[in-house]
Image: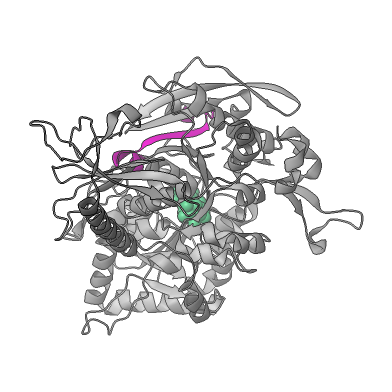
Amino acid sequence: MESLGMARVIQSRPSINPALIKHNSAVIRQLKFSSLCKRRCKNSALRIRRSFSGRSDSKVSASHDESSVVEDEEEEKEEGEEKPLLLAGEMDDSGSLIGFYLIPESGKLVEKHATTDRVEDYEDIEGEEKVQTRASSVIVFVTAEAAPYSKTGGLGDVCGSLPIALAARGHRVMVVSPRYQHGTSENQKFACAVDLNCPTKLFCFGGVQEVGFFHEYRKGVDWVFVDHPSYHRPGNPYGDNYGGFGDNQFRFTLLCHAALEAPLVLPLGGFTYGEKCLFLANDWHAGLVPVLLAAKYRPHGVYKDARSILVIHNLAHQGVEAAITYNNLGLPPEWRAALEWVFPTWARTHALDTGEAVNFLKGAIVTADRILTVSQGYSWEITTSEGGYGLHELLYSRRSVLNGITNGIDVSEWDPSSDKHLDAHYSADDLSGKVRCKISLQKELDLPVRPECPLIGFIGRLDYQKGIDLIRLATPEILEDDVQFVMLGSGNPHYEDWMKATEVAYRDKFRGWVGFNVPISHRITAGCDILLMPSMFEPCGLNQLYAMRYGTIPVVHCTGGLRDTVQHYNPYADEGHGEGTGWTFSPPTKENMLMALRFALQTYREYDSSWVGLMKRGMTSNFTWINAAIQYEQLFEWAFLDPPYTG
Ligand SMILES: Nc1ncnc2c1ncn2[C@@H]1O[C@H](COP(=O)(O)OP(=O)(O)O[C@H]2O[C@H](CO)[C@@H](O)[C@H](O)[C@H]2O)[C@@H](O)[C@H]1O
């Protein structure tokens, strides 16, 4: 895709701008306040008699009991009691009352929302607002992976850290994922999760399936693990050395059914999450969650106040199985169309193949109340035929509820000044430890110890998505130069074999570490000078964020989240001090990638201060989850403003 054209279109795509949110909400509050003041002068004020704690961090619930609401012509103030005024009811487009706005005499504005409890500091209505907004929601993440319990890639990272960030902001957060037992030391990761002794029966796959629930409360989050024998087997969450598991549809159907029961049946911390919650269904594995909400629960009056958001981390994986398997999913027959999927003629295997299938992700896109991708760039790309993996028309039709929020990272786990996996530490103020990390890495990989030699790294799943074909094509030319190159990854056996063979051919220059190893991924991120990410598409990408935080300069294909997060280097900007955090190239050809790499290598070798500038700008960029969490909160509000999807 041509980059300039895409940039132009991106400007019109739906997006969340935090500055705009802040501005708009301030304006809305200002308008509400002034119109309400006028009303207050004309009419008698309606008062709610109730005690009010006034704590800005407490959930405040207004009583809806009629006896507690009285009209009062003479506004008398009883000593020692704060009596908030009822300023107005908030209506939605259909005229339904969805919330109240109250202001107590302390000056704190209190709003009781139909779906969230919000507390906002109102120091000075006329003057500069001291913003301290918290919308407290009840959130249920449903995911196949959540680090540190389970992780094969970025999904695990996000579902392991975003819930903690949201819980820290006052939300009640549960994460539901399978209790994998692979029969290795990895089992220990679930050691602190206790059996809730709450066996639950689910109906799917032609009968009753019984699951158990394990629970650990950690960092403010309820981590709930669904237990079933199908999650107990060697390999990773999705497969083993022989490929993907044949019963993955069954395993993740169970996860979805169980996740919808968990808020109703598990008394976590003494009481259940209840029906008024917000489900965040991550990728196809959780795709049945919005479908079940619409098809199985809402028609019976359960979860009628709940909402769902489908979070797409990777559209390439959709959970597609033969059409006949629909009957196994525990869904009413009349909902078949929501999941129905017909492969285009060219993708069918033979002349009699009708191409009919069920597609979990498609079902979720149809039925979710909102849809979110993990960067704004990707949220637009998936509505195009190039990036939509066959679902672009459907996604385009739902673009009014489609947004993109760039992922954050866990800055405590990924911190070069304290990283437990590193031999030496460093920061933007003192970079001296980085070269020691490089020397340690060269020793560990048995590469010639040459601190001056540029070290290029790659970390990721060995998959078409990650641009491995481009790397394979370009490696002989990359290694003609005086560089070292290390790749860490696992996945497609062809790519794994290529890495092993390349290591043999270039003993002094190339290392291919086949496997999944978190400590070595930290050491490569710290020890390398350049991180290469030529992804064909990249919904967000986390490794470039980790790299920038570690002063390792990313060279990336300008796509999706890579485009949104890596700013192309311009040495002439800022009065010659330079601007940008890495190099981007597009379209993804070998020549373009080599050219970007050569620019990076030349800057590394010849322009020391420019290189340090690049490192420091990356290291001081703000990639915390707080930015993203604020945007998620806006999305939660929007989800509850609209009526739920009912079909
Ligand atoms: N062999 C290995 N050993 C150790 N660690 C390894 C490893 N291979 C990968 N990792 C780790 O796995 C994570 C990969 O995250 P990415 O976001 O780059 O890609 P992924 O495609 O899996 O995620 C998808 O979901 C995320 C989250 O939304 C999106 O950012 C992304 O674009 C999308 O494709 C990183 O933490 C990385 O260090």
Give the x, y percent position of residue 174.
43, 33
Q: Is residue 317 visible?
A: yes
Q: Vertical placement of 375 versus 361: above or below?
A: below
Give the x, y percent position of residue 502.
55, 61
Q: Vertical placement of 525 versus 555: above or below?
A: above
Residue occupying image coordinates x 81% and y 40%: 324
Give the x, y percent position of residue 7.
47, 76
Q: Vertical placement of 348 versus 96: above or below?
A: below
Left-right relation of 529 to 352: left
Q: Which residues are magenta?
A: 164-186
Q: Vertical placement of 314 versus 258: above or below?
A: below
Give the x, y percent position of residue 103.
21, 45
Q: Which quadrant of the structure image shows residue 604? A: bottom left
Q: Which quadrant of the structure image shows residue 111? A: top left
Q: Is residue 444 visible?
A: no
Left-right relation of 491 to 71: right
Residue 165, magenta (yes or no): yes
Residue 568, magenta (yes or no): no
* Colour approach in the figure: one colour
Extreme residue toward the top, this view: 197
Of 197 and 109, the residue lying toward us: 109
Of 414 and 341, the residue lying toward us: 341
Q: How many marks?
A: 0
Residue occupying image coordinates x 18% and y 45%: 108
Of 385 and 190, the residue lying toward us: 385
Extreme residue toward the right, this view: 352
Residue occupying image coordinates x 28% and y 70%: 614
Of 374 and 599, the residue lying toward us: 374
